[in-house]
Image (cartoon, rainbow, N blue to C red):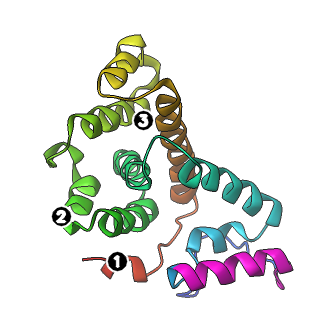
Amino acid sequence: MTKSKEATIELDLPMVDPLPESTQKYFDICAEKLGLVPNVLRAYAFDIDKLNAFTTLYNDVMLADSGLSKLEREMIAVVVSSINRCFYCLVAHGAAVRELSGDPMLGEQMVMNYRVADLSRRHRAMLDFAAKLTDSPHTVEEADREALREAGFSDRDIWDIAAVAGFFNMSNRVASAVDMKPNEEYHAANR
């Protein structure tokens, strides 16, 4: 099947048209604040209930009150996406790391290999845990949680690290399965 250049995924699942008023308002807010509507939202908009479930969980995991900063959550997203080789999330969340850190090199390091970055002990422990949770979740044990505590994370923070890693493991698989296309604007952002 040949898709148009504007297609966000490789499945024939067009957005609901017209979008419900609340969804259109959400898309308008994204366009105003971000300068674009992320293609992941457009992709999920074939089913408004699925879109709402996705955005509710994303907003909770990435934006709700937490001991983790927005940058730390984006760093986890990129490390998980790097291990999973999820093109969409590497492009989109790599751009977010560049923006939030003000450091284009850090964004590239997170995408390629976070271990080459000059990271604090806290960030290294956090990302090592997220990587292990992605690569071999069945091997996570108390010593791994204790390493996070020693790096200054609370038990609530450990939950949040796991929730971010778990969310992106799920979303990476969906994005890869449907060949989700990142917005072109992300590629040049914050370099």
The residue sitting at 67% across, 59% down in the picture is 55
Q: Which residues, given as a range, are shown in magenta?
A: 17-33
Q: Does residue 9 show up?
A: no
Residue type at numbered disc 2:
Met
Residue type at numbered disc 1:
His
Residue under label 3, please give it.
Answer: 134
Residue type at numbered disc 3:
Thr
- Lateral position of residue 94 relative to residue 155, left or right: left
Of the numbered discs 3 and 1, the one sitting upstream in the chain is: 3
Residue 11 sits above or below residue 73 on the image: below
Total label count?
Answer: 3
Q: Secondary structure at mark 3?
A: helix
- Lateral position of residue 136 relative to residue 169, left or right: left
Front position in the image: 167 or 8: 167
- Lateral position of residue 52 relative to residue 71, left or right: right
Crowding at dot 1, Cα within 10 Å, few <14 / some 14-19 / many 20+, comes out as few
Of the numbered discs 2 and 1, the one sitting upstream in the chain is: 2
Residue under label 1, please give it.
Answer: 187
Residue under label 2, please give it.
Answer: 105
- Disc 2 to disc 3, C-alpha distance: 24 Å
> x and y percent of residue 184 in the render?
42, 82
Within the magenta stretch, is there residue 55? no
